[in-house]
Image: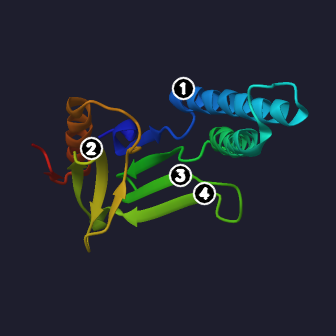
Amino acid sequence: MNATELKKVVPVRGSRRLSNLVTAGIVLLGSLGFLGAGLFSYLGWVSSIIFFPQGLVMTFYGLVGLALGLYLGLTIYWAVGEGFNEFDMENQKVRIFRYGFPGKSRSINLEFDMNEVESVRLETEPRQTLYLRLKGKRQYPLTNEFEPSSLASLEEKATELARFLKVPVEGLP
């Protein structure tokens, strides 16, 4: 084995995806519409909507939507869930790294010895996810649960990783 075959680093996409960006944009635009309609009814600029109770409820929905849109936007900005899986055969180490929300525990950095790895597990229900199974029945996700992926592609990733780690694959149909 040469040096490139001794180490495998697999990037994991987090919240920075087009679908999340589109969702955040739609939520923000919708919330601004609700907030505007509620405020316009309060100011009397819209006569078809009475402020109490319809305008008040629309204002509330607009504020909640703004908070949700801000949360989604910050999640995308901070790249929550993004990271990598590193498999180092030379040092006999496995490293799982992910970014979380800002604070003292901004990042999750798990390291294991290669001899703790029992298998690579493929789960297809309820979501298609690839797990690293360790002795003692602990398992850690290697793929993003919300990242759409075909079953054939996930099976290929599982068998390739299992072959690299020299462990069996569980859960193949």
Q: Position of residue 26 (x, y in %)?
A: 61, 27
> Residue tagged by mark 3?
98
What whole-number distance in Å separates the C-alpha atoms at marks 1 and 2?
27 Å
> Residue tagged by mark 1?
18
In this rendering, which labeled residue sits more in front, label 2 or label 4? 4
Residue drawn 76% across and 44% down? 52
Q: Specify the quadrant that holds the C terminus.
A: top left
- Farthest-out residue, right: 43
Which comes sooner in the sequence, label 1 or label 3?
A: 1
Decide: marks 1, 2 in contact (CB < 8 A)?
no
> Residue tagged by mark 4?
107
In this rendering, which labeled residue sits more in front, label 3 or label 2? 3
Q: Amino acid at mark 3?
A: Arg
> Residue tagged by mark 2?
161
Q: Amino acid at mark 4?
A: Ser
Q: Position of residue 164 (x, y in %)?
A: 25, 45
Q: How is the image coloured?
A: rainbow
Which comes sooner in the sequence, label 4 or label 3?
A: 3
**Left of 89 or right of it: where is 28?**
right
Which comes sooner in the sequence, label 1 or label 2?
A: 1
What whole-number distance in Å separates the C-alpha atoms at marks 4 and 3?
6 Å
Q: Quadrant of residue 124?
A: top left
In this rendering, which labeled residue sits more in front, label 1 or label 3? 1
- Secondary element at image label 3: strand
Decide: marks 4, 3 in contact (CB < 8 A)?
yes
Q: Amino acid at mark 1?
A: Leu
- Farthest-out residue, left: 173
What whole-number distance in Å separates the C-alpha atoms at marks 1 and 3?
19 Å
Which comes sooner in the sequence, label 2 or label 4?
A: 4
Q: Amino acid at mark 2?
A: Leu
Mark 3 neighbour class, 10 Å CA radius: few under 14, some 14 to 19, many 20 or more: many
